[in-house]
């Protein structure tokens, strides 16, 4: 067994008084009732996977009354959750309340920016505020538990679920995961505005080969331990209540049946005391994987491997009682799973008041409140990354004579709500056009031309959209004429909301349809073009990045998108976002990520073109279009006076690293100061650089601040081939700057 034993911490979830109550309840439960707690059913709302059986509410109520269902997903709203809960507590023998789970990924009614956008803020306070809005609204709709945050480290922009994560870096992803979990769960899970969080997808799902959703993954131990697992470990340390496993296998064993990962690493080594929920039918899919003979075998393998709750396969419901009675599955394992599930239920306070989250008055009051909309706007503007701003074309004056807003995404009130949108009201976002109209002086003429149509088909969740066959150029003339006669063009391009998200893998991550063609035509008639990119994944479109003077990466920014974008366009907010994921130059580079391992032939493109034997492409540059950590501001920042407190560090000592950052411009701004390390020689190969610290600072015009980072043994430690988390003596580089490429470098030695 290669899984090492990790240092454990005291559990945040185990409380003696609750454990006693669980003991008392467990002693009264039949095996059937125990298994019932381990069974989760989906309701009918937005089925988020292939349904196991036809929806029959009466049958579900009968099963709840019989104690055969412990939790439901996709049952939402105070009315419906109250009714199902009433059956559980009034009609089942032991009156054990249900808990209701739902995918609240970036908001329930008020939509916050999609997670990859939110991550671009690198601002834990903003991220927490957004998650608080999501928790408050969903808790008011009867929901106890969200299947979020997703913390899969992702490198492949073809994968649709890029939008749900925090990008390519495990350090940033860990910080964001912890911020989100703490905001969702609060200090007290039983509070009326807190919900249980889920660390998902444990583990490796972000590495699906070729970005193809549900595909198999290839991850070596080095990558698993140093890149993939850290956000999960950080989440467990932060007290996350539940962990969701993943569809994929690791080393040929589906995670749902992977005892080494679930029982040994997560539950034992990390002392995780919450419960593991399977992903949708991952128990049943072990049969399709060819890892289990049939659903009964799958249920046995999953239970033994430590999967505590079965989402939607019915394997536990149908077979687990029999497997226990026949001695195939030890009842002790079932008791342990049920203890974990009941623990979370007690912590949520549903035993004290099963209807705690079912108050229709509160439900009405909190949804889309002014306060929540204001936070959505704050989050939106902080999530924007300014990619390009030639000749300081931005910010625009609010008193321009005329602005042309061009592009199907420009007046789109739905796309900004993003994929995985909870119960957002269709077409309820502030569009870019509306944002501009609300921002400019009344003397400014704002005209809109659609120009291109992005997709045909039904936008409803899960139904297919057609993105490629939209070759309609009938709107070009109007758009080009408008561009010709306007002082400035603001052109929206990118992806529709459901072009990214679960099962939305794409082989083309450029601009679809006629967008690029129109863009080229517009550029011919007007040089003042500001591009607003709306997308759920990095878009590879070199011509656009190289030829357009100003580019704003706006992702899908939620209910207040149009306001957030125009806050930046017109300079009411000075952009401060940084990319959490590299933007490739072209699809052939994918996966391109900054923290890749050192190779034996790393030099930059050799000056002698005849020399070809180096790590490079012969038809494209090797570097991404925009690197991890990159983002401009209307201010300019200078880094200087970089110092390390000593050139040598003893292993149990620490170093102080300082850098002076000066705002050399005439306007106030914020900068994300980033610190990277490079372990120059190590027993297993390390990445060329790794983010190990960052701080977002605000600087007035001309102001300087000194930023301090501490280097400790932990900063320098990694999992080597012995899977011990430790630092190895030797030389290190410390790099500091405003992105992962433009860095000041100092060295020291660990002795
Ligand atoms: C499948 C997805 O992978 C998971 O993230 C989600 O939480 C479940 N479906 C439930 O909707």
Image (spheres, rainbow, N blue to C red):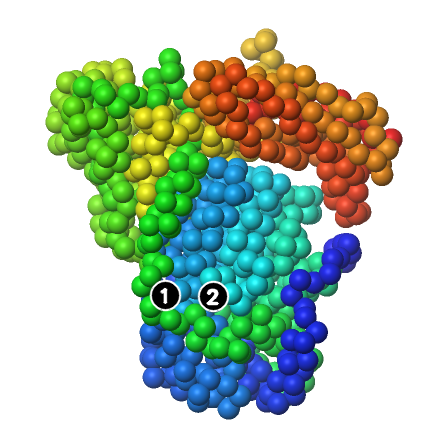
Q: How far apart are marks 1 and 2 (CA)?
A: 10 Å
Q: Is residue 521 left or right of residue 119?
A: left
Residue assigned mark 2: 192
Q: Does the residue labelled 2 lie within 8 Å of ligand 1?
A: no
Q: In this view, does 748 lie to the left or right of 357?
A: right
Q: Where is residue 720 in the image (x, y as percent from the top left)?
A: 76, 42
Residue found 58% across the figure and 59% down from its top: 187
Kindly indicate whether the residue at mark 2 contacts the one at mark 1 (C-beta within 8 angstroms).
yes
Going from N to C along the chain, the mark reached first, 1 or 2, is: 2
> How many numbered callouts?
2
- Residue at the top extreme of this rendering: 608
Residue 303 visible from this viewpoint = no
Residue found 45% across the figure and 58% down from its top: 135
User: Which image quadrant: the N terminus?
Assistant: bottom right
Residue assigned mark 1: 362
Along the viewing direction, whichever of 665 and 53 lies nearer the viewer: 665
Q: Where is residue 292 in the image (x, y as percent from the top left)?
A: 57, 69
């Amino acid at each position: 067994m290669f899984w090492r034993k990790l240092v454990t911490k005291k559990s945040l979830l185990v409380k003696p008084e609750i454990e006693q109550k669980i003991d008392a309840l467990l002693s009264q439960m039949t095996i059937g009732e125990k298994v019932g707690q381990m069974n989760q059913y989906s309701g009918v709302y937005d089925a988020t996977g292939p349904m196991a059986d036809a929806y029959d509410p009466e049958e579900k109520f009968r099963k709840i009354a019989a104690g055969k269902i412990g939790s439901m997903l996709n049952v939402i709203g105070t009315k419906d959750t109250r009714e199902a809960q009433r059956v559980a507590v009034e009609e089942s023998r032991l009156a054990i309340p249900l808990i209701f789970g739902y995918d609240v990924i970036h908001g329930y009614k008020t939509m916050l920016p999609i997670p990859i956008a939110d991550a671009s803020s690198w601002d834990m306070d903003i991220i927490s505020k957004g998650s608080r809005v999501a928790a408050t609204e969903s808790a008011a709709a009867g929901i106890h538990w969200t299947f979020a945050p997703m913390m899969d480290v992702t490198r492949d922009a073809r994968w649709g679920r890029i939008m749900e994560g925090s990008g390519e870096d495990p350090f940033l992803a860990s910080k964001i995961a912890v911020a989100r979990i703490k905001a969702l769960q609060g200090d007290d899970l039983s509070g009326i505005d807190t919900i249980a969080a889920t660390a998902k997808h444990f583990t490796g799902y972000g590495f699906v080969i070729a970005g193809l959703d549900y595909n198999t993954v290839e991850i070596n131990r080095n990558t698993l331990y140093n890149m993939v697992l850290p956000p999960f470990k950080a989440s467990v340390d932060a007290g996350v209540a539940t962990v969701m496993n993943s569809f994929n296998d690791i080393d040929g064993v589906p995670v749902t049946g992977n005892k080494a990962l679930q029982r040994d690493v997560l539950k034992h080594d990390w002392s995780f005391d919450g419960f593991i929920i399977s992903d949708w039918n991952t128990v049943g899919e072990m049969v399709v994987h060819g890892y289990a003979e049939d659903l009964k075998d799958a249920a046995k393998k999953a239970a033994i491997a430590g999967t505590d709750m079965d989402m939607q396969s019915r394997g536990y419901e149908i077979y687990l009682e029999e497997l226990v009675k026949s001695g195939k599955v030890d009842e002790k394992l079932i008791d342990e799973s049920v203890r974990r599930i009941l623990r979370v239920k007690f912590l949520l306070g549903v035993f004290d008041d099963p209807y705690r989250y079912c108050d229709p008055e509160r439900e009405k009051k909190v949804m889309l409140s002014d306060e929540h909309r204001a936070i959505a706007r704050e989050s939106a503007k902080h999530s924007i990354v300014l990619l390009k701003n030639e000749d300081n074309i931005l910010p625009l004056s609010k008193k321009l004579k005329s602005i042309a807003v061009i592009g199907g995404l420009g007046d789109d009130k739905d796309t900004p709500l993003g994929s995985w949108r909870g119960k957002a009201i269709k077409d309820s976002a502030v569009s870019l056009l509306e944002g501009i109209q609300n921002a400019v002086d009344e003397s400014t003429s704002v005209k809109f031309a659609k120009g291109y149509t992005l997709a045909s088909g039904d936008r409803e969740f899960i139904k297919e959209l057609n993105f490629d066959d939209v070759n309609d150029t009938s709107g070009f003339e109007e758009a080009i004429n408008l561009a010709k006669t306007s002082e400035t063009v603001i052109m929206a391009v990118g992806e529709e909301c459901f072009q990214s998200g679960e099962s939305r893998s794409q082989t083309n991550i450029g601009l679809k349809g006629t967008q690029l063609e129109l863009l080229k035509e517009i550029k011919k008639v007007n040089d003042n073009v500001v591009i607003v990119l709306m997308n759920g994944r990095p878009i590879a479109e070199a011509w656009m990045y190289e030829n357009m003077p100003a580019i704003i990466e706006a992702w899908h920014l939620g209910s207040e998108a149009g306001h957030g974008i125009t806050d930046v366009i017109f300079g009411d907010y000075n952009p401060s976002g940084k990319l959490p994921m590299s933007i490739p130059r072209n699809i052939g580079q994918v996966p391109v990520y900054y923290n890749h391992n050192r190779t034996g032939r790393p030099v930059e493109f050799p000056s002698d073109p005849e020399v070809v034997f180096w790590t490079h492409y012969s038809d494209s540059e090797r570097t991404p279009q925009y690197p991890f950590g990159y983002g401009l501001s209307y201010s300019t920042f200078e880094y200087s006076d970089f110092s390390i407190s000593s050139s040598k560090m003893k292993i149990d000592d620490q170093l102080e690293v300082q850098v002076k950052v000066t705002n050399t411009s005439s306007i106030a701004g914020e900068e994300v100061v980033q610190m990277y390390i490079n372990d120059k020689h190590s027993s297993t190969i390390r990445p060329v650089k790794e983010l190990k610290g960052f701080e977002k600072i605000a600087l007035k015009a001309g102001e300087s601040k000194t930023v301090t980072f501490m280097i400790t043994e932990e900063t320098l430690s990694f999992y080597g081939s012995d899977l011990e988390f430790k630092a190895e003596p030797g030389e290190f580089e410390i790099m500091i700057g405003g992105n992962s490429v433009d860095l000041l470098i100092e060295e020291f030695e660990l002795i």
